[in-house]
């Protein structure tokens, strides 16, 4: 439903988030418990529900290089337009959770090279998919100076670029200076992912574009909105309050708008048109 609302609002693409999937489908945090098959199966339904491209969160690829290959090719067959693969240790956890760890530079490069090979194999099979190479090195607690870790991050992103990644994504960029620096250091398109948190400025898509990013991602914003609305509504029900559907007075839609958003009107119209185009059958008898 979220993907359909994103499409209806006019956005050019949707992101199938591992954080949001773990919370909404499993009722658990994003700490590496969601499996490849769960993500691919649920993602297939999302991709089929909309016409806009959907980007899949492939996490670490769920294991070694053969697992990475299976993930990329499986996401391609599921209908994803792109898949992100990152350099966290397996099992991974949300970049904003405690205890984030990453693999070494060489292993990270090997993982992305395996993903690129799998992407190319998918294209040979007729499934066009883009590879987003992601690094979470800036999210690791590191005693080294920030400049050293940032330099290592940029170096790894450049390796991803040279290996053939379509898009590069560095998680944990702290300010405009770091964001502009990484974009000056790369030729391939880059992505900026942001989460609404206290005392953190969330850059608009226009601001992100001015810094050189080609994609702007809000991976958990809709989940946050959903949980906030549900909590407030449940509290109102518990308090035996009357819940209004008037615009601006609650989170609820007027019922006819809910009906429309879910797709009843479209389904009924399609059903009527199918009946109208049904071939007529003669009443004669055959000899």
Image: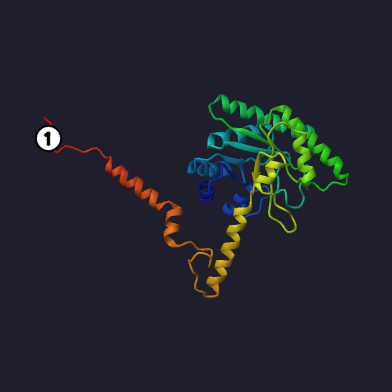
Location of mark 1 (residue): 285
Quadrant housing residue 255: bottom left
**Colour pattern:** rainbow
Q: Residue 37 lies in what quarter of the image?
A: top right
Where is residue 269? Give x, y as percent.
35, 48
Residue 262 x/y as whole percent: 45, 53
Q: Residue at x 33, y 46 (%)?
A: 271
Relative height, residue 238 to residue 266 (above, below): below
User: What residue appears at the point 31 percent right and 44 percent down from the top-left corner?
Assistant: 273
Tell me the quarter of the picture where residue 196 sits.
bottom right
Q: Position of residue 60 (x, y in %)?
A: 68, 40
Foreground residue, 172 or 77? 172
The spot of residue 34 in percent (x, y) is 62, 47
The kind of secondary structure element at disc 1 is: loop
123 vs 192, nearest the viewer: 192
Residue sitting at x 31%, y 42%: 274
- Looking at the image, residue 114 sits to the left or right of residue 128; the answer is right
Q: Along the horizontal axis of the image, is 50 left or right of 225?
A: left
Pick out the residue farthest to the bottom.
240
Numbered marks: total: 1
Q: Quick one: quadrant of the C terminus?
A: top left
């Amino acid at each position: 439903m979220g993907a359909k609302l994103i499409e209806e609002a006019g956005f050019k693409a949707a992101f199938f988030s591992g954080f949001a999937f773990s919370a909404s489908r499993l009722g658990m945090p994003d700490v590496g418990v969601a499996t490849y098959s769960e993500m691919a199966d649920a993602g297939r339904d999302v991709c089929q529900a909309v016409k806009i491209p959907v980007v899949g969160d492939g996490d670490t690829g769920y294991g070694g290089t053969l697992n990475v290959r299976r993930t990329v090719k499986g996401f391609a067959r599921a209908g994803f337009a792109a898949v992100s693969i990152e350099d966290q240790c397996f099992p991974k956890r949300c970049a904003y959770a405690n205890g984030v760890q990453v693999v070494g530079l060489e292993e990270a490069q090997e993982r992305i090279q395996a993903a690129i090979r799998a992407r190319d194999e998918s294209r040979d099979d007729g499934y066009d998919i883009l590879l987003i190479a992601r690094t979470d090195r800036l999210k690791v607690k590191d005693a080294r100076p920030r400049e050293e870790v940032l330099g290592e991050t940029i170096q790894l992103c450049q390796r991803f670029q040279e290996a053939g990644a379509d898009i590069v994504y560095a998680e944990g960029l702290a300010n405009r200076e770091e964001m502009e620096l990484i974009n000056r250091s790369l030729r391939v398109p880059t992505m900026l992912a942001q989460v609404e948190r206290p005392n953190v400025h969330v850059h608009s898509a226009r601001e992100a574009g001015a810094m050189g990013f080609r994609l702007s991602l809000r991976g958990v914003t809709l989940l946050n909105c959903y949980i906030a609305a549900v909590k407030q509504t449940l509290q109102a029900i518990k308090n035996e309050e009357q819940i209004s559907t008037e615009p601006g007075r609650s989170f609820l839609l007027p019922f006819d708008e809910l009906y429309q958003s879910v797709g009843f009107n479209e389904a009924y119209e399609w059903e009527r048109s199918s009946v109208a185009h049904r071939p007529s059958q003669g009443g004669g008898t055959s000899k």
